[in-house]
Amino acid sequence: MISDEVVTIIRDVLKAEGIERASDDTIVSIFEKELIHTGKVPARFLTDLNEIIEAKHKFDKGKLAKTDMETARKGSSGLIQFLIEYLQRKRGRELERAKIRIKRGDKFAEIVLLDKVAFVIHDVDAKETQKLEKAKINADGSLGPREDSTLEEFEKALAGAKFPQRAFIKEPIFEDIKNIFGKDAEVLVNY
């Protein structure tokens, strides 16, 4: 049902905003307070959400007219699309904060720092033959022993990752960068 899909996506967005729990009864008011009133989501989507909820109530009572169903369906497609794009943008910004970009010669590499593990991408432009490694992040901020990894493992780690609000780079990681990429490696800042 459309309403279940919309509620699930709204829960995902609220979770990304730091709100862990929202009951079915309070989800509309939390959505309005946290996303509409703060300007993160346009107000027209609140109307669409209310139409979807109203259609769900009419469906449960067996009184859903075709026009109500069509209105809810039209509103839900725009709302779902906006919320998915919002989530992707939010995760993208979080991911950008967790990346260290390195230039060596004419090639660019990245180290993506997640919670307890880092992924080293040796050449970001080599899509087909991309060498990917992972390493545990030690308590001093350095990288542990590196081992080969796959793109699937990287994607899975990104999907479940919690990104820090701020990423700090400690001195030992610069030594690791020299060891991995050579002493001529350059760290890119806000490119």
Image: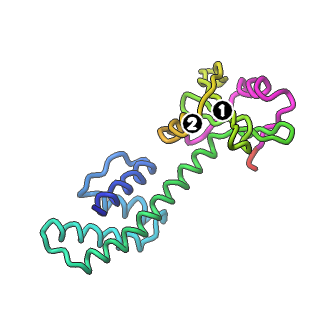
- Hey, which residue is sitting farthest bottom in the picture? 67
Mark 1 residue type:
Leu
**Which quadrant of the figure has residue 64?**
bottom left
Q: Which residue is mark 1?
A: 132
Residue at 37% of width from left, 64% of height from top? 32
Q: Give residue 112's quadrant in the image.
A: top right
Q: Residues within 10 Å of mark 1 (few under 14, many from 20)?
A: many
Question: Which quadrant is home to the N terminus?
Answer: bottom left
Identify the mark at residue 156; answer none if there is no mark.
Answer: none
Q: Residue at x 18, y 71 (%)?
A: 58
Q: Is residue 179 left or right of residue 26?
A: right
Tell me if 149 is positioned left or right of 58 in this view: right
| Magenta segment includes 172 | yes
Residue 148 drawn at (x, y percent): 63, 26
Tell me the element at label 1. strand
Check if residue 78 falls in the magenta segment. Answer: no
Q: Which residue shows up at 76% across the image and 28% down it?
A: 177
Residue position for label 2: 154
Colour treatment of the image? rainbow
- Residue 131, position in %: x, y? 69, 33
**Secondary element type, mark 2:** helix
**Where residue 53 sits: x, y (%)?**
26, 67
Magenta range: 163-188
Q: How many C-alpha atoms fall within 10 Å of the one at disc 2: few (<14), some, or many (≥20)? A: some
Q: CA distance from mark 1 to mark 2?
A: 8 Å
Position of residue 169 measured from the top left corner of the image (x, y, whole percent): 68, 32
Q: Are marks 1 and 2 in contact (CB under 8 Å)?
A: yes
Residue drawn 52% across and 54% down?
A: 88
Answer above or below: position of 191 versus 29: above
